[in-house]
């Protein structure tokens, strides 16, 4: 059996999670502080992939990054980057598609911390960054872990968006979920079962470990 | 001399009211602040610390302007560096007693002295969750003192202490306040609580709009 879809999926999930952690933390922090019309719009856009059919997102990404015209053409000509039917395209799509799973839990956790925690740190002369690093982040660790694991697990399970923008190119864009579909189409049920079982086990172990590490206090991403 | 004249609209459940204070505090003075609930006592302290901005006003501390809404000066809480004891203590759940003080200051001798003052010297490795209410409140006071503030703002700082502990701590604090020549504002609901400690009073009333 060809294990490359599994490795490709794990690589995609790891890169996506890392990128989302770097970008998602400051975004969640920004969203957690105060309200404005602009913030509401941004938050709505970030949350959209939770409810939008993945094929819709994939379709628009396909349009936007198609090398024949517009942005896709410009990226192709200027930087020689192609997002359609390429691994970096999968990373971009996963980044957008999994963002609510990273930003949501972190934002809720930051909002639930009493405002006086950060205020106390400010009166001690600490900068916003020192406060974020030393006070806020350490006190939302369980939610941070939940966010990381959910983002990773969610990226493992992508299908529609990945199929739309990435297609089904062996070793480039054929991730495990697509390999399952592809195997079934070819009536190769043994391979479909193997891929499915591996995905099932990985996901199960990850979710279980969140509950164990958070001492059964893990929160659902939708809370 | 600390010169404060501020105006801030407050939203309360029965409408709006205004917090209006115009008052000078002598350097090194200890003032008790009292008044009905919701009149804006906590807001007043937070305005001085720079955590809340008033609509109008000016705060000058020994000829340094901390706030002047007319010329758009509003120093950050970090620059004002007031010692602030929060009503809900605002202790950091991830830090032990020792880490709280080390986060605020590098002065190890000063930390040692504060721990003895607050009788927390045997609990340095405990996190807030493993301290009693009174111990948590004392830690909040010590953390505010750790930065050796010239201005100390205390929001109901003795509410969880038993009378004996309160009496003993008050004596110790008085010495420290004098040493730091800190100007201290203490919000309190208990009329007799601060007898012998304070040398002035400020009544904040609720002015409806």
Image: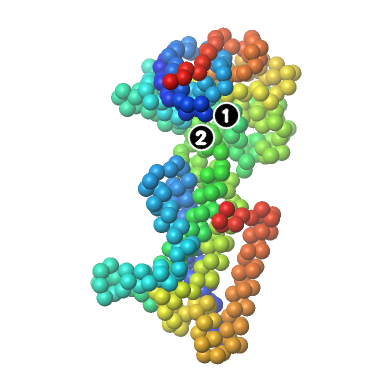
Residue A105 in picture, x, y percent from top left: 54, 53
Query: SS of the residue at dot 1?
Result: loop
Around disc 1, counting alpha carbons within 10 Å, would you say few (fewer than 14), some (14 to 19), or many (20 or more)? many
Q: Alpha-carbon distance for marks 1 and 2?
A: 9 Å
Q: Nearer the viewer, residue A131 or B98?
A: A131
Give neighbour class at mark 2: few <14, some 14-19, many 20+ (Cα, 10 Å): many
Name the residue located 62 percent from the left edge and 65 percent from the top edge: A206
* Vertical arrangement, residue B61 with respect to residue A9, above or below: above
Q: Residue at x 44, y 77 (%)?
A: A163
Picture quadrant of residue A45 = bottom left
Can residue B51 be seen here? The reply is yes
Which label was assigned to residue A119? 2
Report the side of A72 relative to A134 (left or right): left
State the quadrant of the N terminus of chain A: bottom right
Q: Is residue A222 above or below residue B62?
A: below
Disc 2 element: helix
Q: Chain of mark 2?
A: A
Which residue is at the front of the view, B156 or A11?
A: B156
Image point (65%, 39%), residue name: B96
**Circle 1 residue:** B86
Residue A179: give x, y in percent of width and height. Answer: 52, 82
Asked if labels 2 and 1 touch by Cβ distance under 8 angstroms, the answer is yes
């Amino acid at each position: 059996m060809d294990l490359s879809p599994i490795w490709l999926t794990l690589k995609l999930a790891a890169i996506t999670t890392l990128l989302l952690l770097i970008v998602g933390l400051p975004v969640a922090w920004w969203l957690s502080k105060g309200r404005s019309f602009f913030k509401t719009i941004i938050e709505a856009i970030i949350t959209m992939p939770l409810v939008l059919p993945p094929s819709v997102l994939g379709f628009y990404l396909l349009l936007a990054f198609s090398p024949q015209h517009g942005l896709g053409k410009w990226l192709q000509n200027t930087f020689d980057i192609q997002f359609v039917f390429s691994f970096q395209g999968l990373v971009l799509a996963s980044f957008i598609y999994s963002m609510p799973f990273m930003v949501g839990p972190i934002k809720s956790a930051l909002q639930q911390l009493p405002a006086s925690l950060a205020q106390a740190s400010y009166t001690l002369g600490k900068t916003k960054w020192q406060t974020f690093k030393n006070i806020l982040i350490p006190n939302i660790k369980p939610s941070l872990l939940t966010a990381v694991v959910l983002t990773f697990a969610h990226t493992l399970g992508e299908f529609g968006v990945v199929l739309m923008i990435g297609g089904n190119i062996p070793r480039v864009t054929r991730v495990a979920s697509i390999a399952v579909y592809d195997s079934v189409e070819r009536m190769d049920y043994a391979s479909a079962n193997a891929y499915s079982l591996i995905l099932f086990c990985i996901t199960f172990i990850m979710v279980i470990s969140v509950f164990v590490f958070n001492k059964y206090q893990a929160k659902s991403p939708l809370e | 001399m600390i010169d404060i004249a501020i105006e801030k609209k407050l939203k309360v459940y029965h409408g709006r009211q205004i917090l209006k204070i115009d008052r000078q505090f002598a350097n090194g003075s200890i003032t008790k602040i009292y008044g009905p609930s919701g009149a804006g006592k906590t807001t007043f302290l937070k305005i001085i610390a720079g955590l809340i901005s008033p609509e109008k006003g000016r705060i000058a501390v020994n000829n340094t302007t901390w706030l002047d809404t007319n010329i758009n000066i509003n120093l950050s809480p970090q620059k004002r560096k007031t010692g602030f004891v929060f009503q809900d203590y605002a202790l950091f759940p991830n830090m032990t007693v020792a880490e709280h003080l080390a986060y605020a200051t590098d002065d190890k001798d000063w930390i040692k002295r504060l721990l003895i003052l607050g009788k927390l010297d045997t609990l340095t490795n405990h996190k807030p969750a493993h301290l009693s209410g009174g111990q948590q409140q004392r830690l909040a006071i010590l953390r505010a003192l750790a930065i050796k503030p010239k201005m100390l703002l205390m929001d109901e700082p003795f509410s969880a202490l038993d009378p004996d502990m309160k009496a003993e701590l008050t004596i110790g604090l008085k010495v420290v306040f004098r040493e730091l020549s800190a100007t201290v504002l203490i919000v309190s609901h208990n009329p007799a609580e601060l007898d012998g400690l304070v040398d002035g009073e400020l009544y904040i009333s609720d002015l409806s709009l």
